[in-house]
Amino acid sequence: MLRRIRCVGLAALGLASAASANDALLAEALGRPAVPVAEVNGVVRTTSQVKGGDEPETETEVVDPRKEPSKALPSYAVLKSVVGNDARRAAGDPDRMIYTFTTRTVPKGSMGTGKAHVTSDGDDQESYDGTAEVIMDASGHPYISHIALRLQKPVGGFFANVKVIDFDYDFAPTPAAGFVATGMKAHVDVRALLFVHRDVHVESVLVPAIAGVPSKDG
């Protein structure tokens, strides 16, 4: 039954033709309500791995976002600013629609552990190629389930060069009828001078405190 609702909903909102910016499907998805940080029921578990030294270094940290909101996963509410007004449909099928866009806005926040942190101030000086995946919830209404941001080109110079900055964000509905981030990944590849290379991977997931709250772990 759920699959049928999703198929009908996407077909009705425009799989028949290419869409311009801000079409009805994307506008509705971006307008869904976010769960406030104070109401996120669970903890955020972050695992960081740094490669480039003698051996890979891995650390794990668990925080309560209600007590440490600066380490909370990004709010669904910021997606309007991230996606902007120029998103275009790139691909679609009866279950999902993919939009592409370019942005300088990365969700503000800091993720990582003691030896590896990836921080965004919100408005970046660099441009990112983005994709947004829109699917249907159980009621047949669209929401954004995944956002991917990829740095368009390397930045820096001879002394320090950032080759890769990738961000991925996952979102899901909750029983309280709001939407919450369930996971985030970041990958940064940095080279300094000729001999220093660090490849950093950070992954944060929401671990629910009770059953029924969405999780990257299922």
Image: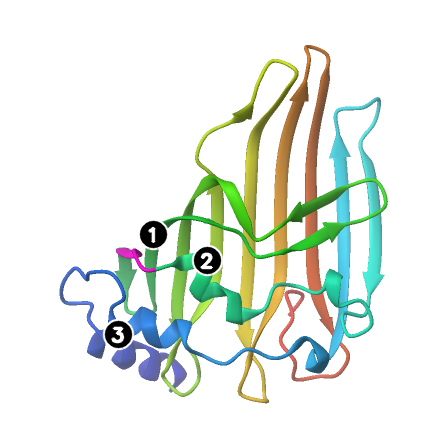
x and y percentages locating residue 10 in the rendered image: 27, 74
Q: Residue 143 is drawn in which quadrant?
A: bottom left
Secondary structure mostly seen in magenta is loop
Along the viewing direction, whichever of 106 and 14 lies nearer the viewer = 106
Residue depicted at 45% across the width and 43% down the height: 128
Mark 3 is surrounded, within 10 Å at the Cα level, by few (under 14), some (14 to 19) or many (20 or more) other residues, namely some
Q: How far apart are marks 3 and 2 (CA)?
A: 18 Å
> Would you say residue 182 sits in the magenta stretch?
no
Highlighted range, magenta = 85-89
- Looking at the rendered structure, the secondary structure element under dot 2 is helix
Give me the C-alpha separation between circle 1 and circle 3. 16 Å
Three-letter code, disc 1: Thr
Mark 1 or 2, nearer chain start:
2
> What's the residue at 25%, 61% (across, down)?
21
CB of mark 1 within 8 Å of CB of mark 3?
no
The numbered dot on residue 17 is none
| Residue occupied by mark 2 | 82
Instruction: State the image coordinates of residue 197 (x, y, percent, origin top left).
Output: 70, 21
Answer left or right for 16 relative to 185: left
Residue indicated by mark 1: 100
Say which element carries label 1.
Answer: strand
Q: Do the residues labelled 1 and 2 touch (CB within 8 Å)?
A: no
Q: Position of residue 122 (x, y in %)?
A: 57, 53
Q: Which residue is at 67% across, 66% downward?
A: 217
Distance, label 1 to label 2, CA atoms, is 12 Å
Mark 3: which secondary structure? helix
- The residue indicated by pointer 3 is 24
Task: Give the percent coordinates (x, y) of residue 6.
Answer: 34, 78
Three-letter residue code for mark 2: Val
**Is 122 located above or below residue 41 in the figure?**
above
